[in-house]
Amino acid sequence: MSIQNEASNHTVDMPADAMPTWPKWPSHDSGTLKLVTEVLESTRWTISGAYDGKETYERRFARAFAAYCGTRYCTPVTSGTSALTISLLALGVGAGDEVLVPGLTWVACASATCSVGAVPVLVDIEPTSLSMSPQAAQAQITPRTKAILLVHPYCRTVDIDAFLVISKRYGIPLIEDCSQAHGAMWRGRKVGSFGAVGCFSMQQAKVLTSGEGGAVVTSDPVLAEKLEQLRADGRLFSGTPVESRLELMERGEVQGQNFCLTEFQSAILLDRLPHLDQQNTQREVCAETLQSLFEEEEDFITFLHRDPRNTRCTYYNLVMKVGLEKYFPGCTIDALARALTEVLGVQVSPLYQPMNKFTLYNPLSSPRIKNFSNRFDFEPTLYSLPEAELARLNHLTLPNWVLLGGAHAAQCIATAVRALAAQPHKVLAFRQAPTHEAF
């Protein structure tokens, strides 16, 4: 069987049985449809609507997700970005402050920091896990550092123990960004429960999704009340609802914004949450199967090191390190990603661009920041991120839903990689293809 790239008229020879039908994502079932229909036929589609005699799906999901994460409170929000934004605000971070941000992560970590007026200080990564380096982070701490924003990236967790020591030593709160790590565990405890707050995204590519959405979890009652107000224009649930009357009451102790999750999204998340652990197990088994297919080939394909303290991994993306120079001479990781995308019929992406070179991170274009006296502190190119830049050159990522395809999916991925390695000249045809956005 041949897979053709129409732009170049090149074909990649593949065995006929090596083309899987990928699992559908996002996933849903009759239970999901039932809850969404209940919302549709109700008189309340959002928490800012009038009380209709029943507890909102938003409150039900908040309670369930807090319990799942091992925290006392959860505030659902519209996105992972809004989760980060209100977390920074709840911790009192603002203009003149600095926040340590990983140099290799999605742009929202830096853009949310900018949105509250604080300077994102870009920190290099550990190459074995692609997470923020504790040593590099400690070297960047100044009297202006008001928070450390940890990201558990792709399919591994940051060294939480090391950052808890740093947090305690310097009195700096940790914000855990778990947007890629729903259900991941460190020493048998869920991520998101270690920092002052834990932030989640429920965007479509995430392992728990409602299309768009997010949440913040915490066990601090003071922070929890601030978070509730910050996402609802300063309003809180009254605790004594009256039918046909608004349930949110005006408190106004903080300057909030409207980041409220709809009842449709909350119902979907409430329905899908009980499936999360089973799906995470499926992904982990598939990832381990794929890894076993490349044993003894460390110069070809390798996978991120797993710290034994990372007692459960989740796979927002599966990351593979490729021996480009030996197996794909003259090819870039971008060309290989495009070739695999064509062959597998699912988007394969390189890592994110390092934040000091990320096309989407352009803080000096913000009208507000342009008026700051310290505006040049926001310049991304001030930071050196050698490990992040090196990692970007030789790693690929596969989206989470391909790992729901089991052993056959693992075999198909391995076959595709080997087929391209046997025809590296054909990968060169993908050098000029349009750049795809990474998941």
Image: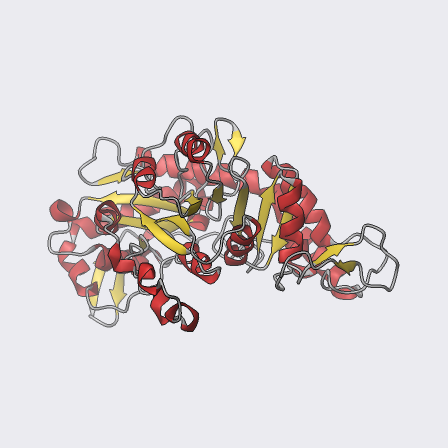
Judge left or right: residue 201 versus residue 67.
Answer: left
- Do we see residue 269 in this rendering? no
Image-quadrant location for residue 361: bottom left
Q: Relative to 79, is 139 above or below?
A: above
Q: Relative to 189, is 431 above or below?
A: below
Q: In this view of the protein, which residue sits in the foreground, 62 or 435?
A: 62
Most extreme residue toward the right is 243
Q: In this view of the protein, which residue sits in the foreground, 100 or 176?
A: 100
The percent position of residue 392, horizontal first and vertical second, equals: 25, 51
The percent position of residue 198, horizontal first and vertical second, equals: 53, 43
Judge left or right: residue 95 versus residue 7.
Answer: right
Residue drawn at x 24%, y 72% as measured from the top left: 7
Judge left or right: residue 384 versus residue 309.
Answer: left
User: Which quarter of the rendered picture does the N terminus lie within?
Assistant: bottom left
- Do we see residue 286 in this rendering? yes
Q: In this view of the protein, which residue sits in the foreground, 439 or 157?
A: 157
Q: In this view of the protein, which residue sits in the foreground, 426 or 208?
A: 208
Colour scheme used in the picture?
A: secondary structure
The percent position of residue 359, horizontal first and vertical second, equals: 31, 65
Residue drawn at x 29%, y 54% as measured from the top left: 354
Image-quadrant location for residue 148: top left
Residue drawn at x 20%, y 70% as measured from the top left: 9
The percent position of residue 8, horizontal first and vertical second, equals: 20, 70
Q: Relative to 119, is 189 above or below?
A: above
Residue drawn at x 25%, y 56% as measured from the top left: 382
User: Which quarter of the rendered picture does the C terminus lie within?
Assistant: bottom left
